Image (cartoon, helix red, strand yellow):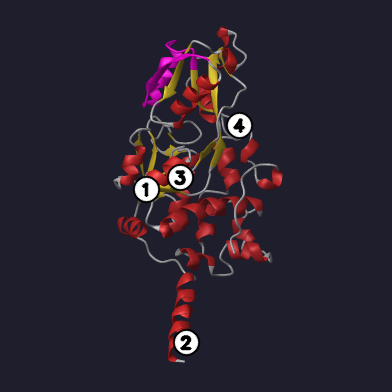
Amino acid sequence: MRRFSLAAAAGMAAIVLSGQAMAGKDLDAVKARGTLICGVATGGLAGFMMADSTGKWVGLNVDVCRAVSAAIFGDSEKVKYVAVSGQHRFTALQAGEVDLLSNNTTWTMGRDTQLGLDFTAVTYYDGQGFMVPKKLGVKSAKELNGSTVCALSGSTTELNVADYFRAEKMTMKPVLSDDPDLIRGAFFSGRCDVFTGDSVRLYATRAATAPNPDDYVILPEIISKEPLAPAVRQGDHQFADIVRWTQYAMLEAEEYGITSQNVDEMLKSDNPSIKRILGVTPGMGKALGVDEKWVYNIVKQVGNYGESFDRNLGMGSPLKIARGRNALWTKGGLQYAPPIR
């Protein structure tokens, strides 16, 4: 009987403990510092991460960092941005130079299992494509045999393009650099026939960097799957959960029609799901180890996923990229969040 009582007590303790997040070393360090250190890409990328004319970082990836800061601190501006190259980014995260990578990193099995990192939630579904000067008259990637190809080194881009040319029994001459500015300059100066990268990188590069955007075409082929996601170090499940559920919260807010403009009015909603999401019905903040208003703070200060997408990439931005596969699942896209409950 005594053994049963002890076992039952231990079981009840486990249940109680499982109802709230346990503190983790990385999260403790972020809180003690009072700032989230976010790794973004050297050279930036329009729409995702770019320093504006005042030096302020803006973009979809930057909004991820701001939203995580809002969840942890209640303030989206407690972020320090550190630019890291494609080759150095994983080392920077492993060494603790940054707390979080939010720089268009593709989630792959090798990276997830071999680098001591955890990927959280996909913030953008993309695929690799090709851009060429219009004057070449090329209509398909299958016409690129013998071409010179500019690509970022230290990325899935380099591996994908080699695989594609090999599979299509074509040859190419790669021009590689881990500096985005150098590789873009090489393409636009005519050193390469082709520029390859994630399709959104091609659109952003053409819109923001090309001397005359109309002189360049993006070919129709997409040769890879590129799920882009933030990454954190393994070992702090609570911090990983906060980053993961921050993305899900922005998606859930969009799905329920909660925006930065109406979030205060939504606090009065009778919808049980909205009440849980916004912390009117408490419990979800405690489960994650943050304030019950964590989602309210994210949406109020950063916006829902749709607002961030439109502002940075979509119709409200210079890029005017359609949502496509990044639309909500309810609208035929792939963006789908587990319920906050």
Q: CA distance from mark 4 to mark 2?
A: 61 Å
Sooner in the amino-acid sequence: mark 4 or mark 1: 1
Kind of element beneath mark 2: helix
Residue at 49% in and 66% down? 287
Question: Is 49 a magenta residue?
Answer: no
Kind of element beneath mark 4: loop
The boundaries of the magenta stretch are 170-194
- The residue identified by callout 3 is 230
323 vs 104, left or right, is right
Question: Is 192 a magenta residue?
Answer: yes
Image quadrant where residue 10 sits: bottom left
In front here: 192 or 306? 192
Image quadrant where residue 213 sits: top right
Report the mark closest to the observer, 1 or 2: 2
Q: Which kind of residue does numbered mark 4 sit on?
A: Ile
Q: Report the disc number at residue 4.
A: 2
Q: Are marks 4 and 2 in contact (CB under 8 Å)?
A: no
Q: CA distance from mark 1 to mark 3?
A: 14 Å
Judge whether 180 appears above or below 254 on screen.
above
Q: CA distance from mark 4 to mark 1?
A: 34 Å
Q: Which kind of residue does numbered mark 1 sit on?
A: Gly
- Badge 3 local density, few (<14 within 10 Å), some, or many (20+)? many
Q: CA distance from mark 3 to mark 4?
A: 21 Å
- The residue identified by callout 4 is 321
Q: Is residue 261 visible?
A: no
163 vs 178, left or right, is right
- The residue identified by callout 1 is 116
Residue 140 in picture, x, y percent from top left: 61, 16
Judge whether 177 appears above or below 7 on screen.
above
Report the mark closest to the observer, 4 or 1: 1
